[in-house]
Image (tube, rainbow, N blue to C red):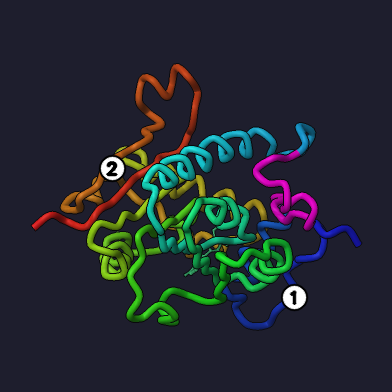
Amino acid sequence: MPQQEMYILPALETEPDFEALYLGVRGLEQRIYTDEQLRQLPQIAPSHVHYKEWQIRKRSSERLVTYLAKKKKPLAILEIGCGNGWLAAKLAGIKEAHIFALDVNEVELEQAKRVFKKSNLQFFEGDFSDQYFVGLKFDVIVFAAAIQYFSPLQNTLAEMLQYLAEDGEIHLIDTNFYTQQTVEGAKRGTHDYYQKLGYPQLAAHYFHHRLDELAGLNYKVLVNPNSLKNRLLKDSPFYWVKINKSVA
Ligand SMILES: C[S@@+](CC[C@H](N)C(=O)[O-])C[C@H]1O[C@@H](n2cnc3c(N)ncnc32)[C@H](O)[C@@H]1O
């Protein structure tokens, strides 16, 4: 059986949990990769259905890696919602970095462990509330295409800031942010999309964060998809936001 067809949601009598719903949609969206494809990501064949998106993600991941490598110091990096681990593996290429990568999605995490074996890369299965990291401080915490599964945004970030070193940074990459004007339309779009796929319950796990929810935090937008430069270059449809601890 080809790997893309393996994760079909079984008929369940009880309400399926997030992981079952998420994997069902991933399968339908053709986002479950073979080990060979995963090893190459973000490179993928031009004929692949998500080739264009991977070109965007290649640019944003290279930007993040270059940015962090310039710090030229040992970095403890936590990626939350690492999925199949492709980005965590790229981050592990940074000199003197140690990567801790966490996800609730056991199927893709097992694949990540199988495909990416590096001495400075560790995968953890579970939710952040499982408290694997109590007492630890990270130099960098990354959510890549993942913050939309966490809510409320402000509580999530407040919790993350407690795990951040004094000069540490949270990076939200490959992320959509909305405005008061666009958020309701986006919610309806997501609801209709999951409904059409046959997974309406997943909409309850997908959150549409607004940029103004970051007010009060020490943050900087490093890539704004709506900037003139970005629109002219058609560089990225996603935000890249950096959050530091507040200066007292
Ligand atoms: C769209 S994927 C992004 C995966 C990867 N970061 C990437 O850039 O390709 C979002 C991931 O967040 C994970 N996730 C959602 N809620 C989570 C939670 N509470 N704790 C850890 N991971 C979570 C999902 O299982 C999924 O693998």
In percent of width and height, residue 227 lies at: 35, 25
Q: Which mark is residue 44?
A: none
Outermost residue, top side: 232
Q: Residues within 10 Å of mark 2 (few under 14, many from 20)?
A: few
Q: Residue at x 47, y 57 (%)?
A: 96
Q: Is residue 41 magenta?
A: yes
**Which corner quadrant holds the N terminus?**
bottom right
Q: What secondary structure do most residues of the magenta stretch adopt?
A: loop
**What is the x, y in percent for residue 8?**
76, 66
Vertical relation: 117 (above or below) 95: below
Q: Secondary structure at mark 2?
A: loop
> In the orientation shown, which residue stands out farthest toward the left?
248
Which of these two is toward me, 43 or 51?
43
- Label 1: few (<14), some (14–19) or many (≥20) C-alpha neighbours in 10 Å: few
Amino acid of disc 2: Gln
Residue at 45% in and 38% down:
238
153 w.r.t. 180: above or below: below
Residue 169 on the magenta span:
no
Q: Camera-side residue: 178 or 89?
A: 89
Q: Is residue 84 toward the left or the right of residue 162 in the image?
A: right
Q: Position of residue 83 (x, y in %)?
A: 59, 61
Q: Which image quadrant for residue 4?
A: bottom right
Q: Which residue is mark 2?
A: 180
Residue at 44 percent across and 49 percent down: it is 187
Q: Which mark is residue 11?
A: 1
Q: Magenta residues, as a range?
A: 29-44
Q: Earlier in the sequence, mark 2 or mark 1?
A: 1
Which amino acid, by three-letter code, is at mark 1?
Ala
Q: Is mark 1 within 8 Å of ligand 1?
A: no
- Mark 1: secondary structure: loop
**In the image, the residue with mark 2 has its CB under 8 Å from the nearest atom of ligand 1:** no
| Tag 2 and tag 1, C-beta contact below 8 Å | no
